[in-house]
Amino acid sequence: MKKNVIITSSNKRDGDFLVQHWFRSLKENVDLRDIDIVVLDYGLNKYQKQKLQDEKVKVIREDERGHIVNQRFIDAGTFLSKCDYDQVLFTDAGDIIFQEDISNLFKTNKDSFRVVPADMEVYFFEYFIPGNFSKRKGKKIYNFLKDKLVLNAGFIIAPSLKFINLCREIKKLVKDKNKYGPDQIAINYSIYREKYVFLDKKYNFLINTGRVGFKLKRGVFYKKNGEKIAVVHNGGRSEEMRLIDNFGYGKKYNKTKEFLFNLKKFLYANVGLLKAVLKLRI
């Protein structure tokens, strides 16, 4: 029976969070008996690397060529093409914690991509398509995606071969590997052309763009109905723009940035108006 794999990536900056929060929460909450853990290493320090290896994590040293958000997919595809895994879970490492077992996700809808969409309208396709693709290709991609929900690339489950092909398409579509953002456009464009299933939002609960709200109790995130959230994703391009302060796994972590939280709710509520006024030109 083939094993499954959880694969992520990190550099030294996010390495402490990877070890102390991402991996620790994964180990304490997820049944890993049939799952390998792989970390693509873009400059972890000696301590971070050793802590992972002591836990039998496969640490794969990679060259820092382009922006890590693009390069991690390309390198993941290369690594996986040399392996024989059944299912792949690809996750962010610097802004995700696990609070419940997610191993059941490997056993259902095994022929499909499994992803979580943002449940608020965001000015995403309009922002990242111009300038990152040729005018002709950009227009084609935008016309295909413009009425679709934005799929978040921080938590993707797929059959190994489908995920490898996704990585190869990202490499092909993203011309400037040093830019932040076009990888997510390529991912949306690719997955929406394949067989996909939307996961319950608790499996990639996007604090940054979530409409349903949440509750915090002693450092633990819950839905408003009291259900514990399985995977918490404190998304945002930079630490300043993330909605949870002191984010992490444990009782002493996690506090909502109330002003920023309310500001983003207002901005997202008016994204539709913004789109209508600006009318993207590609």
Image (spheres, rainbow, N blue to C red):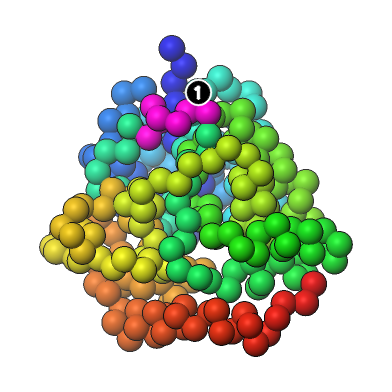
| Camera-side residue of 154 and 42 | 154
Q: Is residue 28 left or right of residue 53?
A: left
- The residue pinned by badge 1 equals 86
Q: Residues within 10 Å of mark 1 (few under 14, many from 20)?
A: some
Query: SS class of the residue under badge 1?
Result: loop
Snapshot quadrant of residue 279: bottom right
Q: Position of residue 38 (x, y in %)?
A: 47, 35
Residue at the spot 62% in from the left edge and 80% down from the top edge: 275
Which residue occupies 34% across, 44% down? 23
Percent position (x, y) of residue 218? 13, 63
Q: Quadrant of the C terminus?
A: bottom right
Residue that appears at 36% across and 41% down = 51
What residue is shown at x 50% (from left), y 23% (from top)?
86
Q: Position of residue 73 (x, y in %)?
A: 62, 45
Q: Is residue 250 visible?
A: no
Residue 176, quarter of the rendered image:
bottom right
The range drawn in magenta is 105-111
